Amino acid sequence: MFDKIKLRFLTEAGTLNTLGKIALVLLYFVIALIIVKIISFIIGRLAKKKYDKLRTIDAQRLKTVLSVLKSFATIIIMFTWFLSALRIFGVNTSAIITTAGIGGIAISFGAKSLVEDIISGIFLMLEDSFVLGDDITVAGKTGTVEKIGLRTTTIRDYTGELHVIPNGEIRVVTNRNKNVQRALITVPIAYDADAQMAIDILTKALKKVDEDHAVIEGVNVWGITDFNSNGIVISAAAKTIPGEQWRVERLMRQVALEELTRNNVRVLDKTIAINNK
């Protein structure tokens, strides 16, 4: 039995014949597939425990990164199998590797920005710099994140324009949806207005805003924070959950203007005084 197998796969000199070489190549291929499966299984098991603890978007990002890692591992393993198969058939792989190296250097100059974009995209995902729906400023553009890809990030600004930014150009990220945010308003009043009365009115009136579900820490009226050529500036602030600070600011301004107007306190709009009398 063993002798028959030897005769089928080996030459008289004891080396592999064509059929034997094909069988060995197929064996290496099966081993390569098994290694790929094992790596995918290990990566999946390591990440599975984290999926439930992450938000949907974060879990999706993690899956994307893991998918890229699996692809890289598969390419490396299958390329190694390919070189091994060539060696089995007596092909000089050194020349191929040298040619690939020279070609790779030539390609790398042309694809430098592409590689940089992809690597930057992977790190953006791993570092959790921002997620879909966040309000951010990157590469001089401000807007809401609509898409995060390996090569580009897409944001839509407040005028509706869509900006596709290569990840390699993202150096600094300003994210207004991380942690606790602050809703801040400034209320300018005329110099001849009663500043203390205005502060008292705002302190009492803005307590209504504290009832808003997005307010974490109630409104604090700071008092007079600035003087300018037109009048006195009174500031007030509240801490809110991420993404709700602008809505809370609008609510604070509405309440402040209504109450000051009702109490005949002259509110300024830049150089224009709103006469409430």
Image (spheres, helix red, strand yellow):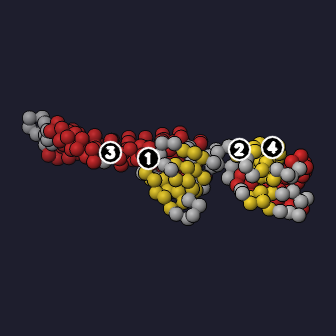
Q: Give the CA distance from mark 4 to mark 3.
A: 54 Å
Q: Which quarter of the figure is the C terminus placed in?
A: bottom right
Q: Amino acid at mark 4?
A: Ile
Q: Which residue is mark 2?
A: 180
Q: Which residue is mark 3?
A: 112
User: Which comes sooner in the sequence, label 1 or label 3?
Assistant: 3
1 vs 3, front mark:
1
Q: CA distance from mark 1 to mark 3?
A: 13 Å
For the residue pair 188 and 69, the one nearer the viewer reads as 188
Secondary element at tag 2: loop
Q: In screen coordinates, is 29 left or right of 129?
A: left
Task: Say which residue label 1 marks.
Answer: 169
Percent of width and height locating residue 160: 55, 65
Mark 1 closeness class: few <14, some 14–19, many ≥20 residues within 10 Å: some
Q: Badge 4, how many Cα within 10 Å: few under 14, some, many 20+?
A: some
Q: Quadrant of residue 259?
A: bottom right
Q: CA distance from mark 4 to mark 2?
A: 25 Å
